[in-house]
Amino acid sequence: MKSLCRLLSTTFLGGVLLTSSLAFAQTFDKSACFAVEAIDRVWSGHRVAFDFVTKGDRQIVAYYDASRQMSVAYRESPTGNWYFQKLDSYLGWDSHNSVVIGLDEKGYIHIVGNLHVNPIVYFRSENPYDVRSLKRVEFMADKISESRMTYPEFFNDAQGHLYFKYRNGRSGSGNEIYNAFNAGSVSWDRLHQTPLVDGEGERNGYFWGPVLGPDGFFHLSWVWRETPVASSNHDISYAKSRDLISWETSNGKPLQLPMTLNSAQAVVPLPQKSGILNGHTPIGFDREGRPIISYQAYDKEGQSQLFIAINIDGEWRRHQVSSWKDSRQELDMTGALPTTLSVKKPAMTLDNGDIQVYATFENNRFAYNLDVDTLRVKSQSIVSEIPEALQPFDKPNDMPLYTAPAKRLEEKGTYFTGDKKFYLAWESLPPNRDKGRTFIPEPTTLTMHCIE
């Protein structure tokens, strides 16, 4: 008893209870992964994309909280506390209205979101890595072009310089525009005098990329659409650039800006109603650094299948990979579509040089190993869309578990997060074609997961 009393010895000083720091000192294993950590309660009425960016040990999460308010959380891993900031923007029922994070080379935080043919909603921090200093900014570089914005996306070049891309206009009539951030003057400028891609008032493009490839080029793929109806998608185009300013075809032919349907290189020429889905043209690379575009389209029997296109010796070869039955995706609709087939993961090169390509069908992720020379399917496997470590958190209910891997920005040095993978996870009802539901579900918990 006396030893216990000594361990828990206390002193009263001015009415305040002081406890021996030695008695309750805690140590943390800063090298170990935590299994799961709750961040906040979030909106679950329909799926909308959240964002997660890391640089060194700094982690930034952007999401919509339980009251649909745009929110940002920041911490320095592994033992730093979360700092939260609520922003003046509230989500409706539109699944297009994602929220995205940009981080420039000086550490200023940029947040854009809640957009579907709306004026830009943009916040920028006044101090590096300080979410509490986020303030609303009226526009970036062009108030008129940024008054009808959709599909905002930040990205960085190899030097860490920050860029921003978006669609000006609407589905079936829009242009792709790029902005560049000057961290020295803390200002944005249009990267090009014209749109990068111009729909000419008759169509628009849906883009994947630009993706910085192993050859030092940025690679860009896109689908053209003539009307707001998804079945009017047609033709997959491609372009590449070393500096994001001057663009060329896969064979090095310069392309004049803006690129249009007639001037762009169509690497997969397909007419409307061919089953192509916009936003599903991920770009990967083979062992020689050649770009591989994965996509979905109808086969000869009218079923939706996974295809790839790869540039070999200056010629784009197209190859059907899957052979599913009863897989046709009906695309004669507008809004966020209730499809069961998704082609969102880029192709990868395996250690033996073979190509692995992916598609998710009926909640299962198919991985196909292709011979790099013949593109013949050598083997296939089926795994869950959800990473194995996160599967126990997928509860048996009508709310799918959505996951988002951290986007890692390069940082020199050694740090805790360097050899670990981080994911966000949250449950939500699926998209409802951007229409309101007749009920409001209970909020769910947004969690972060660390995987060794």
Image (cartoon, rainbow, N blue to C red):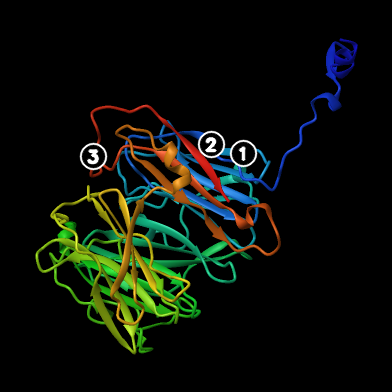
Q: Counting other residues with Cα less than 10 Å from the Cα at mark 3, is it few (<14), some (14-19), or many (20 or more)?
A: some
Mark closest to the chain's N terminus, 2 or 1: 2
The x, y position of residue 391, in whole percent, is 42, 42
Residue 159 position by quadrant? bottom right
Q: Earlier in the sequence, mark 2 or mark 3?
A: 2
Q: Left or right of 418: which side holds 181?
A: left
Q: Give the structural element (helix, strand or loop) at label 1.
A: loop
**Tag 2 near tag 1, CB within 8 Å:** yes
In this orientation, does residue 49 appear?
yes
335 or 356: which is nearer to us? Answer: 356
Quarter residue 332 falls in = bottom left
Q: Which residue is drawn at 27% across and 81% down?
A: 317
Which amino acid type is shown beneath numbered disc 3?
Lys
434 and 198: which is toward the camera: 434
Q: Name the residue under label 2.
A: 39
Residue 258 visible in this rendered orientation of the protein: no
Q: Please state which amino acid type lies under the numbered disc 2.
A: Ile
| Residue carrying label 3 | 435
Residue 444 falls in image quadrant: top left
Q: Which residue is drawn at 23% across and 39% down?
A: 435
Residues at marks 2 and 3 touching, judged by CB atoms closer than 8 Å: no
Q: Decide: is 7 above or below 330.
A: above
Secondary structure of the residue carrying tag 2 is strand
- Tell us which disc is closer to us: 2 or 3: 2
Amino acid at pointer 1? Trp
Q: In this view, does 129 lie to the left or right of 97?
A: right
Q: Against 163, is 424 above or below?
A: above
Residue corresponding to mark 1: 82
